[in-house]
Image: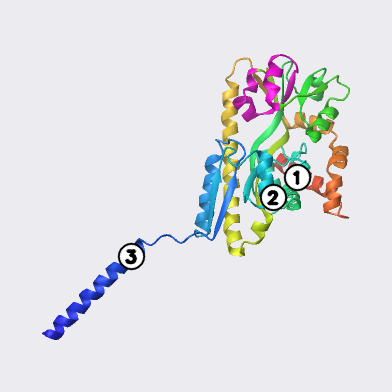
Amino acid sequence: MSGVRNCTMKTILFSLIAVCFLFGAMNLPAEAAQYNWKMGMPWPVPVQDQFHKQFIELVKEYSKGKIEITYYPDGQLGTHDEIFHSVQDGSVDIGYFAPYVNLVPGGVLNWMPWTVMSWEAAQKAFDRKDGILWEMMEKAYNEVGMTMFYQVSYGPYGLGNNERPLKSPADLKNLKLRVSSSLGLVRMLQNMGKGSGMTLETIPWSDLYDALGKGVVDGCWSMWPSLVELRHSEVLKYYSDLNFAWDMNNVVINKKTWDALPKDLQDAVVKATVETQAKLFANQEKVQKDFIAKLQKMEGFEITFLTDAQREAFRKASNMGPIWEELCKPWLDKNYPGQNMTEKVQKELEKIHQEVLASKK
């Protein structure tokens, strides 16, 4: 009987030890992340915010907790340019930027007119695996010490004015349009309005609403979100969806930080970036439809939806060949010597354009 009692006592003792070990394990602190990154957002982006936060959660999940990203929205880490330089020197790891050419010389390709004219074309041109504009912008960011994570778009630009619907280049006659210092778009408008008496005025974006309301200018380029959120539709009568330019911003990481990351963790992050970009594109396309529906209900505001043929007439009048030679060729020749990349990039973009047109038939 004593042997039985001893056996029973041992069983109880081992059970107590097991229970204590289990509860102790449950209360152990989680393993600390191996990589702690800071992500800076220079502007308020309420529509996008949830997706940037989801990206951070996906990175944590796919890296099995080895990468933790702390998000600093609404300019908490500084202005756009300040955060850019912080990512460049590595004091901030990830940033959200518009690739202005004073910061990213190759960013000129991001702003060239008629490169992308639809969400379908944007998905093809900015595809991480084989998109021609992804490849060009990755090279551009590498040049300034960064590498791209994912693209963020607000969609296409059109032309609004207070004189008449714009259905052909001839309708630009005698209009005074506001422009910025985006040289590619300025050159495009100059070509489209050649001989029409159209004039261009440089006015800060922040002053545009008042300038339109007071008649300082007749019109401007704008986009669906700006027509609603910045209330451009209140001071414009007509808007044509030319889709001549595409808004695209970039979420990027310091290149040295990225290159030092093990391959398995790079793969985990890339998986999160691909999912995030797809979700952002799909959401913004939906938001665009909501904006259009709201604008169509406005009294005194008329939208002209151009046919493909009408849009092609504006595109042809833009005469983009010389503009590419002036603005893009110097950078492309420097970074792709002897490869004739100016012609190759335009050819690939034209191929995407024709594929999208064919898919509509």
- Give the vertical position of 284 relative to 239 (above or below): below
Give the amino acid type for the residue marked by disc 3 in the picture. Answer: Gly
Under circle 3, the secondary element is helix
Give the amino acid type for the residue marked by disc 2 in the picture. Answer: Gln
Q: Do tag 3 and tag 1 residues touch (Cβ < 8 Å)?
A: no
- Give the vertical position of 8 relative to 215 (above or below): below
**Residue 354: % across, % down:** 75, 42
3 vs 1, front mark: 3
Seen as rendered, the residue at the extreme left is 1
**Residue 230: % across, % down:** 62, 25
Read off the residue under disc 2.
88
- Give the vertical position of 266 relative to 315 (above or below): below
Q: Do tag 3 and tag 2 residues touch (Cβ < 8 Å)?
A: no
**Residue 175: % across, % down:** 79, 18
Residue 228 is inside the magenta segment: yes
Under circle 1, the secondary element is loop
Give the amino acid type for the residue marked by disc 1 in the picture. Answer: Val
Cα gap from disc 3 to disc 2, whole angstroms: 44 Å
Q: Which callout, 2 or 1, points at the residue further toward the start of the chain?
A: 2
Does residue 82 appear to the left or right of 35 in the view shown?
Answer: right
Q: Which residues are magenta?
A: 205-234
Disc 1 crowd, CA 10 A, few/some/many (<14, 14-19, 20+): some
Q: Main secondary structure of the magenta part?
A: helix
- In the picture, the disc for residue 24 is 3
Read off the residue under disc 1.
104
